[in-house]
Image (cartoon, rainbow, N blue to C red):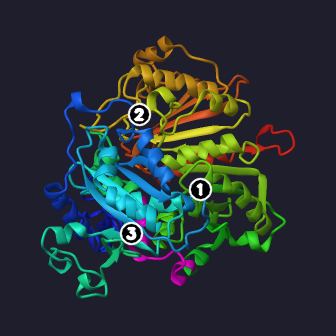
């Protein structure tokens, strides 16, 4: 590593440069959490006094009592509990469930909760403590989001959680409020909170509303950040990497240089529809256009040549990434994250289509969107590919399983090389035996690309997960779980089975890639690119074809890089789908 290596926009890696792009609500939210820990903490109970029956979700460490939930359902509130770095609960009026679009008149109140999360009953204790809020929500038909923290949400995960909740439950993002009752309970007021300034209002207490007796501050348009997704993935990487990740080595490399070029757009622009940004894409040779389907936005970037020669069909690269209208900056983040795909499209290689929602069922809308896109653009339906990173990678794989004739090949990014089983995750992004059988019923080439230093410590498979940060949950933490997940991957990809002993034997393999990945491979490569070593393993399927590729990028946390995209595209573009027979066609 050479710490003197310089490039344009390198200053964007400074940890404080993004401070001015953060939500103005952050100081207030953090102050409330600190005070809640003092005034409103929800304590746990001794183990021998805890209820042990109910429905348990390991992801959120939440044990839910069906009898309590049935009672609230009967009163008109739907319960949803999950986790996204921090656990959260949504209580939504049942009459709102299934609503399309985001423009109804229902209010949503975000309630910050401090609870002892080690007690799995924290979720039921929360409903008990805020029973009055729930009674008012049931009567007056508004939604409540309870975000729970055991300490302080210093990374402001509530922002991502609210984004997910808005999409999941089609909440009106223009009617979003923060419960500020703790402020007045503590005997102070909003204008006295250190560091908090409410945009456009010198006296924020004057704009606090009473919604069914709850002191609520309007935070519509103010709760989202306009920073970079890479801010918490690389600049503050503890939630996205294991202990072996070297942040400085990444920043002082070609990867850091490529990423800085991409994240510049997140720093320079607030809205993806900014005419200056659209003109820049046009000058590069691509046109960005915005579309709607059933109230959901999808975005295309097509090479200008596609408009000149519509008879020439082009591949379509479906990128599962949220580009919802409630946050105009979100689409810029998507372009930044997949910046190398914009370069590929600008060269005339393909048409890009960005779309994702927050559930497997909702993402089925992509099928109809593809039909619409094919009417607008010269898309070769034989060559439609799909990709996504992290949970969107899992969404991409599930879309492929549900719509196998739509997709010629898939690239899952930042996901485990194996297939997660229900026994491992307890219901979180599981791949059931039925899903594996369905995937294996059609030959769909798949490339899975992950960082070697992801937070889940995915490699090598022949050992327990290494370099795990204290307190970090890893689904595949033992060799046994990792080996079984690989066996499931081979089955879904129509590849010959490997025994546990064969997987374990890679620990002593003479092949360095097999040793580093812990995967028995038919072909391997060490590719030095962009300042780092990348490890590639190819596995033959039962027909002797290399349709499964596993890649680990050296010194990479849980993020997308230009190398990842280049390797994904070089694999995907080789394949097509016969629309009549379903056969996988190798083009190259």
Whether the residues at callouts 2 and 3 have beta carbons within 8 Å, the answer is no
Cα–Cα span, label 2 and label 3: 35 Å
579 in relation to 167, above or below: above
User: Which disc number belongs to residue 319?
Assistant: 1
Taking the spot 57% from the left edge, 81% from the top edge, the residue there is: 279
Element type at mark 3: loop
The secondary structure that dominates the magenta segment is: helix
Residue in the image at 22% along x and 27% along y:
48
The answer to whether any part of residue 252 appears in the image is no
Disc 1 crowd rating (10 Å Cα; few below 14, some 14-19, many 20+) is many
**Residues in magenta?**
257-278
Against 229, residue 585 (above or below) is: above
In the figure, residue 142 lies in which quadrant?
bottom left
Q: Is residue 355 left or right of residue 464?
A: right
Question: Which one is closest to the eye, mark 3 or mark 1?
Answer: 3
Of the image marks 2 and 1, the number of the one nearer the N terminus: 2
Q: Which mark, residue 54?
A: 2
Query: Mark 2 or mark 3: which is in front?
Result: 2
Residue at x-position 58% and y-position 30%: 432
Which one is earlier in the sequence, the residue at label 2 or at label 3? 2
Percent coordinates x, y for residue 141 in the rendering: 47, 66
């Amino acid at each position: 590593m050479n710490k003197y290596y310089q490039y344009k926009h390198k200053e964007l890696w400074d940890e404080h440069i993004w401070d001015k792009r953060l939500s103005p609500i952050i100081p207030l939210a953090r102050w409330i959490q600190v005070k809640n820990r003092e005034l409103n903490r929800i304590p746990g109970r001794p183990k021998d006094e805890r209820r042990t029956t109910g429905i348990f979700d390991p992801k959120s460490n939440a044990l839910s009592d069906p009898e309590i939930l049935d009672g609230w359902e009967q009163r008109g509130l739907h319960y949803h509990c999950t986790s996204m770095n921090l656990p959260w609960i949504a209580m939504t009026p049942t009459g709102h469930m299934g609503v399309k679009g985001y423009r109804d008149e229902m209010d949503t109140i975000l309630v910050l909760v401090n609870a002892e999360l080690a007690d799995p009953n924290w979720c039921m204790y929360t409903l008990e403590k805020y029973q009055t809020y729930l009674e008012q929500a049931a009567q007056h038909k508004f939604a409540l989001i309870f975000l729970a923290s055991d300490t302080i949400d210093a990374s402001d995960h509530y922002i991502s959680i609210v984004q997910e909740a808005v999409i999941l439950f089609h909440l009106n993002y223009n009617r979003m409020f923060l419960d500020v009752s703790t402020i007045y309970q503590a005997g102070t007021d909003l204008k006295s909170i250190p560091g908090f300034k409410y945009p456009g209002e010198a006296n924020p207490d004057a704009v606090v509303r009473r919604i069914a007796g709850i002191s609520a501050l309007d935070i519509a348009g103010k709760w989202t950040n306009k920073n970079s997704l890479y801010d918490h993935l690389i600049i503050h990487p503890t939630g996205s990497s294991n202990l072996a990740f070297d942040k400085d080595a990444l920043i002082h490399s070609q990867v850091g240089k490529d990423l800085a070029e991409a994240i510049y757009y997140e720093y320079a622009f607030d809205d993806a529809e900014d005419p200056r940004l659209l003109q820049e894409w046009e000058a590069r040779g691509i046109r960005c256009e915005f579309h709607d389907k059933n109230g959901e936005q999808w975005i295309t970037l097509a090479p200008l040549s596609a408009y000149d020669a519509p008879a020439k069909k082009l591949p379509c690269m479906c990128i599962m990434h949220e580009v919802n209208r409630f946050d105009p900056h979100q689409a810029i983040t998507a372009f930044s994250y997949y910046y190398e795909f914009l370069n590929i499209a600008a060269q005339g290689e393909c048409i890009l289509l960005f779309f994702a929602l927050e559930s497997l069922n909702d993402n089925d809308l992509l099928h109809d969107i593809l039909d619409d896109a094919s009417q607008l653009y010269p898309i070769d339906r034989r060559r439609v590919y799909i990709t996504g990173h992290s949970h969107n990678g899992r969404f991409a794989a599930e879309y492929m399983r549900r719509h196998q004739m739509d997709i010629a090949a898939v690239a899952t990014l930042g996901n485990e090389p194996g297939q997660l089983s229900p026994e491992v995750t307890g219901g979180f992004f599981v791949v059931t035996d039925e899903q594996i059988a369905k995937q294996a019923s059609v030959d769909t080439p798949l490339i899975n690309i992950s960082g070697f230093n992801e937070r889940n410590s995915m490699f090598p498979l022949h050992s327990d997960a290494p370099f795990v940060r204290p307190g970090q949950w890893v689904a595949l933490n033992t060799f046994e779980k990792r080996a079984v997940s690989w066996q499931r991957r081979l089955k879904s990809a129509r590849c010959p089975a490997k025994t546990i002993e064969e997987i374990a034997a890679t620990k002593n393999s003479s092949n360095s890639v097999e040793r580093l990945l812990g995967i028995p491979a038919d072909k391997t490569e060490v590719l030095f690119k962009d300042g780092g070593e990348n490890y590639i393993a190819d596995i033959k399927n039962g027909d002797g074809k290399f349709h499964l590729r596993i890649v680990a990028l050296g010194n990479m946390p849980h993020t997308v890089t230009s190398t990842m995209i280049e390797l994904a595209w070089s694999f995907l573009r080789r394949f097509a789908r016969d629309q009549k027979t379903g056969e996988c066609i190798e083009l190259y």
